Amino acid sequence: MMKRTVVALAFSLLLLGPLPGCVQDQGATKPQIEAKQNLGRALLAEGNKQSALKTLLEALEMDPENHEIHNALGITYADLEQMDKAEFHLKKSLQIKPDYPEAMNHLGLVYNRQGKYGQAIEMFTRAAEDFMYPSRFAAYNNLGTVYLFMGEPRKALDAYKKALQVFPEYSPAHDNMGLTYEALREWDLAIEAYKSSIQYAPNYPLSYLHLANLYLKFKRYDDAREMVLKAMEVDKNGEFKRDAKRLLDECGKRG
């Protein structure tokens, strides 16, 4: 049986904290600081984590009290699996700007990885309830993943529905609703949720595999096989190759 995967926001953006008493580099202009920060983010987006870290640290030296740089460093450290440093920088970002929902959401992700679920729920809720936050839908989705993991599917479902109220085409929330409906044994609703996820993100393999797995449960082998083959077709990087092969083998054995 394939491992069930809940879709949450991936970390994507680093370091040692600034020295006590550091002030902004008087020789650095605001455009220079922004350019350095943007370069660090771009390097991270390309997967060049160490160069991104180095660049963001240089940006931090220019402006140690910049909440956006601390947020970027927090994301980067989380991406590097250095959760203590990630937590430090995200907390520093919120210390500088307490109403910064981006850092709240990212700190929630760090707390979730650390197993601090109550604190994760608090951060996701605060971010999601900020009506000025453009990514409220992502915070609601993250909140749902915590509730689902904690065995509270009704609360998870409520969070996913709120995510979709903000952004109806957000595929990860549809996919996660499918998993939640499965946990509630509401099979038809699970199928519809997976189909909605596929409709809005037809090139994402995971929803095809989740739907195939559910079809297998109800001995709909031809439908399951079709979904697995579609997943393999759109899985350009082979990320889900092993799960797809396992499900395809199951289709062959049972059907």
Image: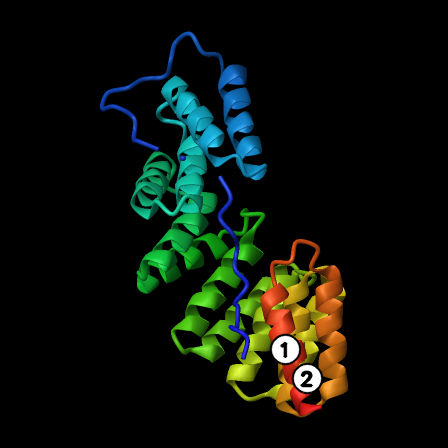
Q: Is residue 39 above or below residue 124?
A: above
Q: Tell me where residue 79 sits by quadrant.
A: top left
- As drawn, the label of residue 247 is 1
Check disc 2: other Cα within 10 Å, few if <14, some if 14-19, many if 20+: many
Identify the element where label 1 is drawn: helix
> Image point 58% across, 73% down: which residue?
177
Q: Quadrant of residue 238?
A: bottom right
Residue labelled with disc 2? 251
Indicate the amino acid at tag 1.
Leu
**Amino acid type for the residue under numbered disc 2:** Cys
Kind of element beneath mark 2 = helix
Image quarter hosting the C terminus:
bottom right
The percent position of residue 27, horizontal first and vertical second, equals 42, 7
Specify the farthest residue to the left.
Answer: 20
Callout 1 crowding tier (Cα within 10 Å): few <14, some 14–19, many ≥20: many
Q: Nearer the viewer, residue 77 or 157?
A: 77
The quarter of the image holding the N terminus is: bottom right
Left or right position of 63 against 204: left
Q: Residue 35 at what x, y percent from top left? A: 55, 21
For image coordinates 55% across by 26% down, the residue present is 39
Q: Residue at x 33, y 47 (%)?
A: 83
| Residues at circles 1 and 2 in contact by the CB criterion of under 8 Å | yes
Is 122 above or below relative to 190? above
Number of marks in the rendered image: 2
**Which mark, by number, is residue 143?**
none
- Regarding residue 241, the answer to whether it shows in the image is yes
The chosen color scheme is: rainbow
Residue 243 image point, x, y percent: 59, 70
**What distance separates the C-alpha of mark 1 from that of mark 2?**
6 Å
Point out residue 22 in the picture as x, y percentages from the top left corner. 28, 19
Q: Quadrant of residue 249?
A: bottom right
